[in-house]
Image (cartoon, rainbow, N blue to C red):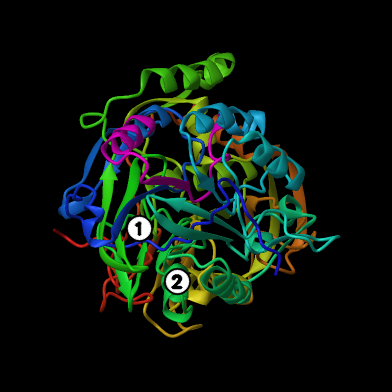
Amino acid sequence: MRRYHWIAGSAVVLWLAGSSSVLPAARSAEDGSRSITLLYIANLHAQLEPHAELFWRGGHDETTTAGGVARIARAVEAIRRERPGQVFFMDAGDTIQGSAAAAWTEGRVVVAPLNALKLDLGIPGNWEVVYGAGVLEQRAREFRHPLIAANIRDATTRKLIFPPYLVKEVGGVRIGVIGFTDPDVPERQPPSYSKGLIFEGAEVLPPVIEELRHREKVDLVILLNHVGLPKAIGLAETLKGVDLVLSGDTHERTYQPIVRGETWVVEPGSFGSFLGRLDLTLRDGKIVDRKWELIELRADRFDEDPAVKKVVDEALAPLRPRLDAVIGRTEVPLMRYNVVETSLDDVLSDALREAAGTEIGLSNGFRFAPPKPAGPIRESDLWDWLPITTRLKVGQVTGRQLRAFWEREAEHVFSRDPRKLFGGWLPRPSGMTVRLVAGAPTGHRIREIRIGGKRMEDDRSYTLVACEREGDEPDKLCRIPHVQAPRVLDLDAHQAVRRYLARHSPLPAAVGGRVVAEDLPPVVRSQVLPSGSGGNRRPDPHPTP
């Protein structure tokens, strides 16, 4: 295998986990020990400014202002002053997509603010391909920190697009970090996005780990990945030689590390509302102490860095009039923090169905978008909800096809096998209700489907609208194959939602109950569910303190 050396000729391999206690100061090296601090963010989704955030730790829901790149910068700089020369700061992907400003500039607007953070390393997430392979590589060249990924290759040359790992000496510790991005990108995203790229699976990782351990002689191997927490746990259970698994993709908030043998697994939330911190002490190349803290970047706890705020303001200034245009109003908060059903997606699926005049509307189970408080809805909010422009596609599907679709989607969300988990959360329907049992066997979860209030008939055809996925077969609709009479409308999802808001603002409280999991509580905010609650029955990353 080719040996890669970036920045100071060193590589870092990380796998994250730990306890939520306050971290100690650097330990003296008199006993031969060395201490370092690993920091990382994930799933920024181009949320450059402070925004509303929902915190629910301890069973209490609270919405307050948090995040913003300038606030991340202030928190990171304080830790760097506390532990000079001992800090390594990383980004776990889904960075240049997720907002209007990012979409309108193909991610260019994110470059200067992210460079102001002085990151040491990053990896591409599953949405980094949204503007095409060429733009991804261009943004990587514009960043001042390197991107790594051990499993993304050029489809023509079969060469790796990025180095597979980075080795670096930090605080006297030689660390090696492996980058690994979701192999399912070509199916999760519209196929046209990743055209020209090949995404390989976890089979590429053992040789890289072997090289870091035995050829590079690193003290610490870290897997910085964008595959989601359940799959990251699965990797921790099967890979040998990895000390820390730093997860991204699923927006999970691990206040306590998930421990598999000697390996810790963690994930640091999303939208720049959190900063993950892991303090490690090593002696003779072995970890002798480690502590994990998930830092909530609330506005009442952290100020913004003025210089970085200026960079953000300057980047957004040309777009401000369009971003701030008011397109509607809501009387209630609109949320997307629920695996099963969300108030925000009820609105979006209703908008699609009304625009198309179909019996059923489906919105994808996206995770991105901070909560929207009651008040005016702006153009920037719409693009937070739907950061890509897609036309509406309609077709006719049988009840039997719909049942198979829901069984497949439920398996993607609730499978006990992390390798079968796929994409976001459950689809969001309009004109349809679904009752299921999350913990039931594969293919036997769906208990009842109603359309227009009536029980679905397997042999009857129903009209359906969803968003077009570029690169799909003409007769595929929302991952449903062999749809009859498919056609693409001369109307995109943004236009449909704007029209809906113009007709229905201010939006009232949603009725809910469109999708019900009989064995789960009404609100489930994690795919890593507590034991006994159905689903994949893995440890709860959000324990009550």
Helix or strand or loop: what does disc 2 sit on?
loop
Left/right placement of residue 83 relative to residue 500 reads: left
Asked whether 49 or 140 is in front, the reply is: 140
Residue 424 in view of the camera: no
Say few, some or many: other residues with alpha carbon within 10 Å of mark 2 (under 14 / 14 to 19 / 20 or more): many
Asked whether 101 or 472 is in front, the reply is: 101
Label 2 and label 1: CA atoms lie apart by 43 Å
The image position of residue 454, as x and y in percent, is 47, 66
**Residue 242 tag number:** 2
Q: Residue at x 56, y 31 (%)?
A: 110
Asked whether 449 or 46 is in front, the reply is: 46
The amino acid pointed to by label 2 is Val
Point out the stretch of residues depicted in magenta: 73-100
**Residue 513 tag number:** 1
Q: Residue at x 45, y 48 (%)?
A: 42
The image position of residue 166, as x and y in percent, is 56, 55
Q: Please tell me whether residue 401 is drawn above or below residue 315 in the rendered image.
A: below
Considering every residue shown, the one lying at the far front of the view is: 30
Say few, some or many: other residues with alpha carbon within 10 Å of mark 1 (under 14 / 14 to 19 / 20 or more): some
Name which of mark 2 and mark 1 comes first in the sequence: 2
Residue 160 in view of the camera: yes
Residue 99 lies in the magenta-colored region: yes
Q: How many marks?
A: 2
In what quadrant of the picture does the C terminus appear?
A: bottom left
Q: Please tell me whether residue 6 is drawn above or below residue 153 in the rendered image.
A: above
